[in-house]
């Protein structure tokens, strides 16, 4: 299986820089400290998928010069992960077909609510054409490629991570059960959220993410969903243990 992950966005719900913030991270001249909302593009066996379509989706796809999108996988229904969904219509026109959207039931209900105009009996010309596909607990297929859903918690909210071959992608989590961890073990690449250094109510902090990566035993771990509170990319990277890296917008990693 030929795979690559491209990090479209690596920031938290407010992005980095944060509006009206003058901290050293938000005013940094290092482009790696400029973080749009968390999203990733997965290339697998000639396909291109996106995990999460947040409010920066259009900007991210333009920046990536993306001309292919075969499926969208959603982790959960928070707005920083679904607000860009309307812009998949470009790929409806380009590929002349509906766009398959894979998500759990709660997230699909949110899509139907937020984008109610997409699902009316008399659809306005040009609105997105979405093919909603519910993810349950068992592995599912996306165009003949197996995806294993990983159930995690974002405080009390169920969120999905995804294992695709040797890649596991998890964001917006602060708890993963031992049973779900078994699904992750053996991954060569682990993507994991690490919001800041201080403990947080609904996200892993830096040390918790590092500890979890050691439990999983991934060859390389890339940290995402990063806030300005974590610190500057260059300085934090120098503190990380071997095999753990801060992701940044535009980073591409072969798997």
Image (tube, rainbow, N blue to C red):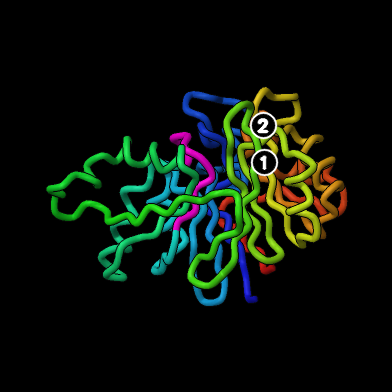
Badge 1 marks a residue whose secondary structure is strand
Residue at 63%, 62% (x, y): give it.
Answer: 164
Residue 201 drawn above or below residue 90: above
Quadrant in the picture for residue 252: bottom right
Question: Does residue 67 appear left or right of residue 148 in this picture?
Answer: left
Looking at the image, which is closer to me, 140 or 62?
A: 140
The disc at residue 23 is none
The residue wearing badge 2 is 203
x, y percentage for residue 121?
15, 47
x, y percentage for residue 30?
62, 45
Residue 125 drawn above or below residue 203: below
> Is residue 80 part of the magenta span, yes or no?
yes
x, y percentage for residue 238?
82, 45
**From the image, which quarter does the N terminus lie in?**
bottom right
The answer to whether the residues at label 1 and label 2 have Cβ atoms under 8 Å apart is yes
Residue at 76%, 60% (x, y): give it.
Answer: 187
Q: What stretch is highlighted in magenta?
A: 72-81
Dot 2: few (<14), some (14–19), or many (≥20) neighbours within 10 Å?
many
Badge 2 marks a residue whose secondary structure is loop
Residue 102 drawn above or below residue 42: above
The residue wearing badge 1 is 193
Residue at 60%, 54% (x, y): give it.
Answer: 138
Dot 1: few (<14), some (14–19), or many (≥20) neighbours within 10 Å?
many
x, y percentage for residue 192?
69, 45
Residue at 45%, 56% (x, y): give it.
Answer: 72
> Is residue 253 part of the magenta span, yes or no?
no
Quadrant in the picture for residue 255: bottom right
Question: Can residue 207 be seen in this snapshot?
Answer: yes
How far is mark 1 from mark 2, CA to CA? 7 Å
Question: Does residue 111 appear left or right of residue 234 in this picture?
Answer: left
């Amino acid at each position: 299986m030929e795979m690559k992950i491209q990090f479209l966005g690596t920031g938290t719900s407010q992005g980095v820089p944060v509006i009206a913030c003058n901290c050293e991270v938000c005013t940094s001249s290092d482009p790696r400290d400029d973080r749009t909302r968390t999203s990733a593009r997965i290339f697998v066996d000639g396909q291109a998928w996106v995990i999460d379509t947040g409010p920066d989706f259009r900007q991210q796809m333009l920046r990536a010069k993306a001309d292919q999108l075969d499926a969208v996988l959603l982790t959960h229904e928070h707005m920083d992960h679904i607000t860009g969904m309307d812009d998949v219509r470009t790929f409806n026109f380009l590929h002349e077909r509906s766009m398959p959207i894979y998500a759990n039931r709660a997230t699909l209900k949110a899509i139907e609510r937020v984008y109610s105009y997409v699902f009316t009996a008399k659809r306005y010309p040009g609105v997105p054409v979405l093919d909603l596909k519910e993810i349950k607990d068992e592995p599912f297929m996306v165009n003949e490629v197996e995806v294993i859903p990983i159930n995690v918690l974002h405080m009390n909210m169920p969120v999905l991570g995804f294992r695709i071959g040797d890649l596991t992608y998890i964001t917006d989590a602060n708890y993963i059960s031992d049973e779900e961890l078994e699904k992750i073990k053996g991954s060569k690449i682990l993507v994991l959220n690490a919001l800041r250094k201080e403990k947080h109510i609904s996200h892993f902090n830096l040390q918790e993410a590092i500890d979890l990566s050691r439990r999983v035993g991934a060859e390389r771990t890339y940290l995402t969903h990063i806030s300005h509170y974590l610190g500057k990319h260059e300085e934090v990277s120098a503190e990380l243990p071997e095999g753990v890296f801060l992701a940044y917008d535009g980073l591409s990693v072969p798997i």
